[in-house]
Each structure stands twice: as C-alpha cells, then as structure tokens.
Amino acid sequence: MGGEEHAISESAQRGLTLFQTKERCTRCHSGLNFTDGLFHNLGIDWDTDQVDVGRYKVSNDPDDIGALKTPTLREISRTAPYMHDGRFVTSEEVIDFYDRGGIQNHHLSNLMIPPNLTIQEKADLVEYMRSLNGEGWEVTPPVAFPQ
C-alpha cells in the first residue's frame, strides 16, 4: 500500500483491498482523483420512464446511451445524495446498487458485474470510502478532459 502503516483503520485497509480486487472499483475510479474521466452506463434511470440518455446527447454514438461521467470519490462521504439523480442517500445504498450489478439494460457497461459482497465487506468498503476525505487534493488538475 505505501505510506504510513496505520494511516487508515484495519477495516478501511480491507475496504481498499476490496476496492482494488473483488469490487473492481479501480476500473472506473482510478488515479489521483479516483475517476477515469470517462462515461459509463450503470443502469441509472432504466427503472423509470424518464431515462437520461447521458453522453449520447453530445456524441450521438449509440454506445454512449445512458453513459454518465465517472465522478471523483474524493470527499465522497460528504457529498450525498449520490448518482446524478440523487437517488441514494447513503454510501451503503450505492454499494448495494453496485453489488446488484446496476440496473439491466441493453447498453449497460460490461464493467457492471455483481461482486456478491458480504455484509462485512460492504462495511469495510464504506469505511474505505470515508478515508477518502482530506485536504489538498483540490489543487490536483485533471490530466485530460473528455472529448
């Protein structure tokens, strides 16, 4: 891991391991700001009659239907509600959503694979998310902007 051995709790350390492995969060939430800066369809809105077509509005690329930009996870425990429509109030709800593999639709990202987390693993992941609070990250400029 690097840095100070006890900088985060044991639960948060287990959450970090899950974040990088079983949960596969780093596929989209990577780099200094915990975002790939790309657009992905997680199925948000596909359980309503008001589907947000997302990036498709700009690109007109059918592969972008329902794809929304990956947000940073910095300060994530302080920025509820979650998702672009504010449907989730807690980090636990977000983790449950990902654990179910999002909401099925024809354009769902192939990265949305249910990891089948245990109750303890979900708690550890929430604890890791809380450890992403801090100062100084705001001055880190993005490496590139989406085209």
Image (cartoon, rainbow, N blue to C red):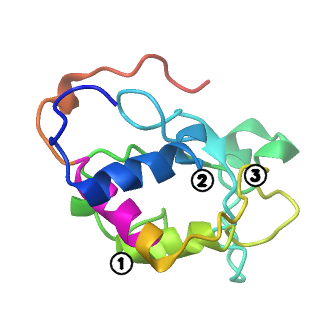
Vertical relation: 128 (above or below) 96: above
The answer to which quarter of the image holds residue 129 is bottom left
Residue bearing the label numbered 3: 109
Residue bearing the label numbered 1: 89
**Camera-nearest residue between 13 and 48:** 13
Q: What residue type is labelled 2?
A: Lys
Q: Position of residue 20 (x, y in %)?
A: 51, 42
- Label 3 environment density (alpha carbons within 10 Å; few <14, some 14–19, many ≥20): many
Q: What residue type is labelled 3?
A: Ser
First reached walking from the N terminus: tag 2 or tag 1 = 2
Q: In which quarter of the image is the C terminus?
A: top right
Residue bearing the label numbered 2: 22
The reply to whether callout 2 and callout 1 are in contact (CB within 8 Å) is no
Q: Where is residue 18 in the image (x, y as percent from the top left)?
A: 49, 52
Q: Position of residue 145 (x, y in %)?
A: 50, 23
Answer whether residue 147 is magenta in the image. no
SS for callout 1: loop
